[in-house]
Image (cartoon, rainbow, N blue to C red):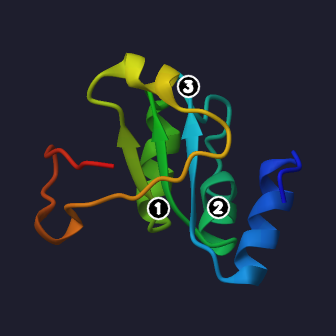
Amino acid sequence: TGEYDGVPDCARQYKAAGIPWVVIGDENYGEGSSREHAALEPRHLGGRAVIVRSFARIHETNLKKQGMLPLTFDIPSDYDLLQTGDKVAITGLDNFQPGGSLCS
């Protein structure tokens, strides 16, 4: 729509429209969100992955438990290249292994 809104509100709109989505975040994403519900909501609302510079340890684990794909930038400064409205496609999932790299 070109309008800004909170992540949960946008996520609900995307879910209703059948559009998968990802979260792009900065450093220590999920700090203070150790409860599993904080990781459950994105999955429930149709999220597929969380891509960040770094995760708070417990939150990364909880995302995995909820079936979300927690990813970090191989080159943290690549975060700065993203702009509002960019579309992200994650490729290479067919052969993805723990510790491996994906392309987007």
Marks 1 and 3: in contact by CB < 8 Å? Answer: no
Q: Residue 102 at x, y = what percent?
A: 23, 49
Q: Quadrant of the N terminus?
A: bottom right
Mark 2, residue position: 42
**Of label 3 and label 1, which has the lower sequence position?**
3
Mark 3, residue position: 26
Position above or below: 61 against 91: above
Label 2 sits on a secondary structure element that is helix
The amino acid type of the residue labelled 2 equals: Pro
Query: Is residue 100 toward the left or the right of residue 71 in the image?
Result: left
Q: CA distance from mark 3 to mark 1?
A: 17 Å
The amino acid type of the residue labelled 1 equals: Met
Q: Nearer the viewer, residue 69 or 103?
A: 103
Mark 1, residue position: 68
Label 3 sits on a secondary structure element that is loop
Q: Residue at x 13, y 46 (%)?
A: 100
Q: Residue at x 60, y 55 (%)?
A: 39
Disc 3: CA contacts within 10 A as few (<14), some (14-19) or many (>=20) = some
Label 1 sits on a secondary structure element that is loop
Q: Residue 31 at x, y = what percent?
A: 62, 29
Query: Is residue 14 toward the left or the right of residue 9 in the image?
Result: left
Position above or below: 43 against 51: below
Marks 2 and 1: in contact by CB < 8 Å? Answer: yes
**Of label 2 and label 3, which has the lower sequence position?**
3
